[in-house]
């Protein structure tokens, strides 16, 4: 959260994160080069430029797989949330490595010739008559442009000015970039280095990304189905289950008929309902906690007061709130969202409402 | 802000540690990350090793791009500039060196107006499987007439006949060692640029035992090939034409419409 902008709001965590990520990327490139030099040397040596180009390109692909796996991993196991915290730095790093790969490839393959390298890039191998001959460079260029767009708008300045929804949509293009890169590799490197291992590695990567996303989606679906029994007692009030089953300072999510997820927090002797979507990057607030009296997003720690959905001063972010009531120990949420920042009195808990709630009374 | 992970008798039975970037990392999470981070780094290194071993042998090509070498011989066009160098033995045999300029440019110096002129050449040698090339130094006197070189007795090209060969069209400079590997889909754009720039095109064939052969390509009338060859570069092709051999160098006079994609 911030009230102003700086290039990077460095913290100890971010420095450690970046050091580990940069170290892993450097280790990848060094290992790739070392193996390439050991396997093919003397007359059979691969050109240094091509070896570096391959190391950079494959490193960017591996990092992109890591980036795409972080989201679902964090949904499946909250212990991976620290990896998600600084994912944007990993994205920018991936873009820079991919850019280095592209610069080397364009300079080496398309430079030193009779035409401008940019013109050569777009025309030299252009043959769209067959799938196998399709210019794989175009796919890589498209992916690089998307990654540039994402890296250059990764700062919170753009998040605020583009609006959270637009920013999120823009950054969902990472899946388009991923698909383009799969095509780039399949129609390029895999056709040059024909063998069994490379396609298997790419297939495993694709399987991992798809499998984790499907698992996370299945879990979300199960939560929606399990925590939202179709017992809403009217068209506007939704049953959110027994209050006693919501852990202290935590939340349960319920899904409104329109698909909007609502986070029902138990805090300070009451329950409050807010949208499940963080105003920052759309993080799932119901997986957060109440810390210092504020709902805290699990992704980047953005905070909101449960009573009005406003960030504590001096911050100015606001999220939608919902009316809430307790009927016979069960929380019920009015499914109509109130404008962001609208104060709503928390539904107060009685002793009987918390019967069986891990043996506690009105503690917070 | 307070630590959200301090335990309390009122906590639920399972209370996973909660991470907030600006708060101290909870001890259980620190332990988890202490295991997960090195494990992930190890997996990344394994991925690097696995990715690197998928690379193929680029072939036994050499580009001696250190100190320039000197050569003496006779210039011919067949139809690309070639230097015939005598082996100085009594057999009067000669080696054929394709000539190219630096970068992706064929050798087209104005003074090469006639065949058979004796010259001194200075440049860097490329070779692969007995095929040789000289990349000329950029200096204007890197190729100059040298009347001290004795006339070379050369044989005539041997006509083999009409053949259809399957293989891949590459640019001879990269394939002979300027770029390794200098073939395949990823090299297609570079090969196209090289051939457009005048680097002699070569068909690389592979027999049943995997042995490679390299055949210089020219038009049916013996001229350098032009744009008709561009769409087929770096793709699997079958080419029909008249095969000739001259001092160990093979040349295919490609029949009109004689190139087909496979």
Image (cartoon, rainbow, N blue to C red):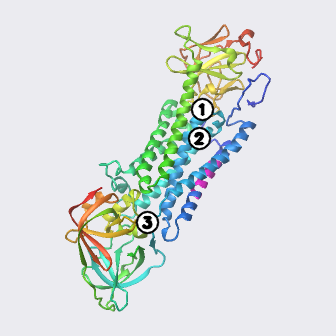
Q: Position of residue A332 (x, y in %)?
A: 61, 12
Name, please, the residue furthest toward the front: B208
Q: Are marks 2 and 3 on the same chain?
A: no
Magenta stretch bounds:
A20-30
In the rendered image, residue A25 lying in the magenta stretch gets the answer: yes
Along the horizontal axis of the image, is A109 left or right of B108? right
Question: Magenta segment, principal secondary structure?
Answer: helix
Compared to residue A234, the image places residue A215 above or below, namely: below
Q: Output the chain of dot 3.
A: B
For label 1, the residue is A75
Q: Position of residue A109 (x, y in %)?
A: 41, 60
Helix, strand or loop under label 1: helix
Foreground residue among A337 and A264: A264
Q: Quadrant of the C terminus of chain A?
A: top right
**Going 48% across and 65% down the picture, which residue do you hit?**
A47
For label 2, the residue is A87
Along the horizontal axis of the image, is A141 left or right of A17? left
Q: Quadrant of the N terminus of chain A?
A: top right
* Among the two numbered marks 1 and 2 on one chain, the one whose residue lies closer to the N terminus: 1
């Amino acid at each position: 959260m911030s009230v102003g902008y700086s290039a990077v709001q460095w913290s100890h965590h971010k420095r450690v994160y970046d050091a580990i990520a940069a170290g892993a990327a450097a280790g990848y490139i060094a290992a790739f080069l070392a193996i390439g030099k050991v396997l093919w040397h003397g007359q059979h040596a691969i050109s240094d430029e091509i070896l570096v180009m391959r190391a950079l390109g494959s490193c960017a692909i591996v990092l992109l797989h890591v980036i795409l796996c972080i989201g679902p991993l964090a949904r499946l196991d909250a212990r991976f949330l620290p990896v998600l915290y600084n994912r944007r730095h990993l994205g920018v790093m991936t873009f820079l490595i991919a850019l280095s790969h592209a610069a080397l490839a364009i300079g080496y393959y398309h430079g030193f010739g009779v035409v401008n390298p940019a013109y050569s890039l777009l025309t030299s191998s252009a043959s769209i008559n067959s799938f196998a001959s399709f210019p794989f460079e175009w796919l890589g260029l498209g992916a690089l442009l998307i990654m540039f767009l994402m890296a250059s708008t990764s700062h919170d300045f753009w998040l605020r000015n583009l609006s959270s929804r637009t920013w999120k949509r823009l950054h969902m293009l990472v899946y388009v970039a991923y698909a383009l890169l799969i095509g780039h590799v399949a129609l390029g490197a895999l056709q040059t280095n024909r063998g069994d291992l490379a396609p298997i590695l790419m297939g495993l990567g694709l399987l991992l990304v798809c499998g984790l996303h499907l698992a996370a989606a299945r879990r979300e679906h199960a939560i929606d189905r399990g925590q939202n029994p179709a017992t809403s007692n009217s068209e506007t009030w939704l049953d959110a289950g027994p209050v006693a089953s919501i852990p202290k300072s935590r939340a349960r999510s319920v899904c409104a008929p329109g698909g909007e997820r609502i986070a029902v927090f138990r805090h300070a002797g009451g329950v409050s309902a807010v949208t499940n979507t963080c105003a920052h990057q759309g993080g799932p607030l119901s997986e957060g906690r109440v810390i210092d009296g504020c709902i805290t997003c699990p992704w980047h720690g953005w905070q909101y007061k449960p009573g009005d959905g406003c960030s504590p001063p001096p911050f100015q972010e606001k999220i939608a709130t919902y009316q809430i009531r307790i009927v016979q120990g069960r929380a019920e949420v009015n499914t109509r969202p109130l404008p962001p920042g609208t104060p709503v009195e928390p539904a107060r808990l009685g002793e009987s409402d918390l019967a069986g709630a891990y043996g506690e009374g009105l503690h917070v | 802000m307070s630590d959200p992970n301090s335990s309390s008798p009122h906590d639920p039975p399972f209370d996973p540690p909660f991470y907030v970037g600006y708060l101290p990392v909870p001890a259980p999470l620190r332990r988890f990350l202490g295991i997960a981070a090195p494990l992930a780094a190890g997996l990344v290194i394994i991925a690097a090793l696995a990715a690197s071993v998928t690379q193929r042998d680029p072939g036994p090509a050499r580009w001696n791009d250190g100190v320039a070498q000197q050569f003496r011989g006779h210039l011919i066009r067949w139809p690309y500039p070639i230097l015939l160098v005598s082996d100085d033995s009594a057999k009067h045999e000669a080696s054929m060196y394709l000539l190219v300029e630096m970068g992706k440019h064929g050798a087209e110096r104005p003074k090469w107006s006639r065949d058979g002129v004796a010259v001194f050449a200075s440049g860097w040698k490329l070779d692969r499987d007995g095929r040789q090339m000289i990349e000329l130094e950029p200096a204007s006197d890197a190729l100059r007439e040298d009347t001290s070189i004795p006339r070379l007795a050369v044989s005539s090209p041997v006509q083999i006949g009409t053949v259809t060969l399957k293989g891949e069209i590459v640019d001879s400079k990269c394939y002979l060692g300027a770029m390794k590997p200098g073939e395949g889909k990823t090299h297609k754009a570079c090969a196209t640029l090289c051939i457009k720039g005048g680097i002699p095109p070569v068909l690389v064939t592979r027999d049943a035992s995997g042995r490679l052969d390299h055949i210089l390509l020219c038009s049916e009338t013996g001229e350098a090939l032009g744009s008709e060859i561009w769409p087929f570069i770096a793709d699997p092709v079958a080419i029909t034409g008249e095969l000739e051999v001259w001092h160990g160098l093979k040349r295919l006079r490609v029949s009109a419409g004689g190139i087909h994609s496979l």
